[in-house]
Image (tube, rainbow, N blue to C red):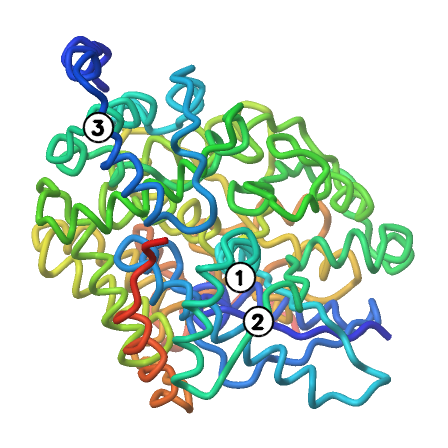
Amino acid sequence: MPQMTDERVRARLTREEDLSLLHEVSMKTAGVSHLEMCIQCGTCGGSCPSAMDMEHTPRMLFAMLRAGMRDEVLRSNTQWICVSCYHCVVRCPQEVHIADVMYTLKGMAIKAKLYQDSTAPDFSQTFVDMVETYGRSFEFGLASRHYLKHFPLRLPGMAPMGLGMIAKGRMGIKPKKIRRMDQLKAILERASQLELTS
Amino acid sequence: MNKYLLYPGCSMESSAKAYMESMNAIMEPLDLRFEEIEDWNCCGATEYLGINLIPAYSLIARNLALASDQIGRMNGMGRTRTVVAPCSACYLNLAKADYYMQERPSLGVKVNEALAAGGLQYKPGTLDVRHLIDILVYDVGLEKIRGSVTRPLHGLKVAPYMGCMLPRPDYQHRWSDHEHPTELDDLLRALGAEVIDYPLTTSCCGGHMTQIGPETAFELIRRLVADADDRGADLMATVCPMCQMNIDAYQNEMNHHFGTDYHMPILFFTQLMGLAFGREPGELGIGMELVNARNALARIGVEVPITQEPSGPRKKDEGLPMPRRWTRHEVRKEAVK
């Protein structure tokens, strides 16, 4: 269940405001995030289908950002539980790009190595590796590598489903590769040197 | 004839082959022509965005750049500026990249700097990114769809499942509503189906959580399946490969997790269109679903040939693809001949 108490956050907020963390997250988010506009109404958490599995609701997390609680925010499981359904985004009266802020926080948590025991960062990384090798997603390779690494005991349980997908011709066991992989690699290489700052 | 560029997306070639087959089957009756973007790459789904921003948007934008190049090479007559994406996640990524590159020009500049390393560029706003159902409802039109129906789906109770990434965040204002859009309902009604009230129509299927946090995903899948079942649906109709995969392929695991016994088939809306247009199940990828739709479709007189069912307990006469043992009934029937 998400934490409902704001006391610690409120204590931090009464000090002289340092909004550098809030601005940093806002600037690193694609589009115009409107993160600074959050009015703490809580519509986001109330709209969230997976809030009960989150340590902090999005509203709480944004208050923590304002309070400069970097490590606590990046350690939260909230951004990893977000399913990107955009319910909160269309309901937010301030038009905060909440789902995209969650993507930004994931990236920051990975770089700071502050995420918890979630296997999500590794899943994302495996996915990225597949795309950077083939230019296409490769479901069989992705699922089998992820399960082998993280849930080996679940494999027997999942096997009927996997075999079913293969038998129905819905899961290729060979990856598809794009023609101009060199071009894609050059683009991604240049892209990773560029960071969004202003 | 309406011609568009097509961004199929990775799933259409693997887990959502049935979507691809059925989409191709309805092209001709509706006078549609799709030209695939040459050498398109993966859109990054929901994974790339969480790692690095500029590479994620550059990955998406390469497709937009290739598409606008391809349009530049088309001759005047068949020229379009619309890219059709049948997958909701691909649709959202492409549409969102195009929108954010305009909303935040510095993102557009950086992405173009990256694209330049591959000799490409994309001017945001050049293309219209639209989902397949948008094209069918708003360009082709319900009248034309109704006119192509030869086998109305009378009596088939369908739960219309739009999913979340299609109607939201909807920066381009394409849908009738963000939470209760009616496009899919209208389309299914045009096919003659009985559309049930389905308030969860845009609730999330769990997305990638089936891989990384199955318990979170199972609960979301349970809500969708249970509600469709409570309301008497024979099957669900979807517009998204990810939704189909989660609700179909993980239904068994979900049942196992909660000790429930739901059997709720989920088909792509194009498969139902194909059936209504008189095409045969085999041409529409019907039978590729793991929760089979055989009983549901029997209600409208469609007979789905039995294929193997590896996910359930194996039944004697539909196991491995070996010479089938005849039932006593069949032997007798053959003897009469």
**Image mark 2: chain:** B
Of the numbered discs 1 and 2, the one sitting upstream in the chain is 2
Place residue A183 in its image quadrant. Answer: bottom left
Q: Position of residue B81 (x, y in %)?
A: 72, 71
Task: Please name the residue shown 10% across and 40% down the image.
Answer: A116
Same chain for mark 3 and mark 1? The answer is no
Pick the residue in front: A134 or A160: A134
Find the distance from the CA under tag 3 to the CA under tag 1: 36 Å
Tell me, for residue B323, which label it has, or none.
Answer: none
Label 3: which residue? A18
**Amino acid type, mark 2:** Tyr
Give the number of the mark in front: 3 or 2.
3
Circle 3/circle 1 CB separation < 8 Å: no
**Image mark 3: chain:** A
Circle 1/circle 2 CB separation < 8 Å: yes
Relative to residue B176, is residue B200 drawn left or right?
left
Q: Position of residue B233 (x, y in %)?
A: 60, 33
Circle 3/circle 2 CB separation < 8 Å: no
Same chain for mark 3 and mark 2? The answer is no
**Amino acid type, mark 1:** Leu
Label 1: which residue? B94
Find the distance from the CA under tag 1 to the CA under tag 2: 9 Å
**Amino acid type, mark 3:** Asp
Give the number of the mark in front: 3 or 1.
3
Tell me, for residue B7, which label it has, or none.
Answer: 2
Q: Quadrant of the N terminus of chain A?
A: top left
Relative to residue B108, is residue A10 drawn left or right?
left
Task: Please name the residue shown 48% across and 51% down the image.
Answer: B244
Would you place residue B306 above or below residue A198 in this image?
Answer: below
Pick the residue in front: B222 or A134: A134
Pick the residue in front: B217 or B247: B217
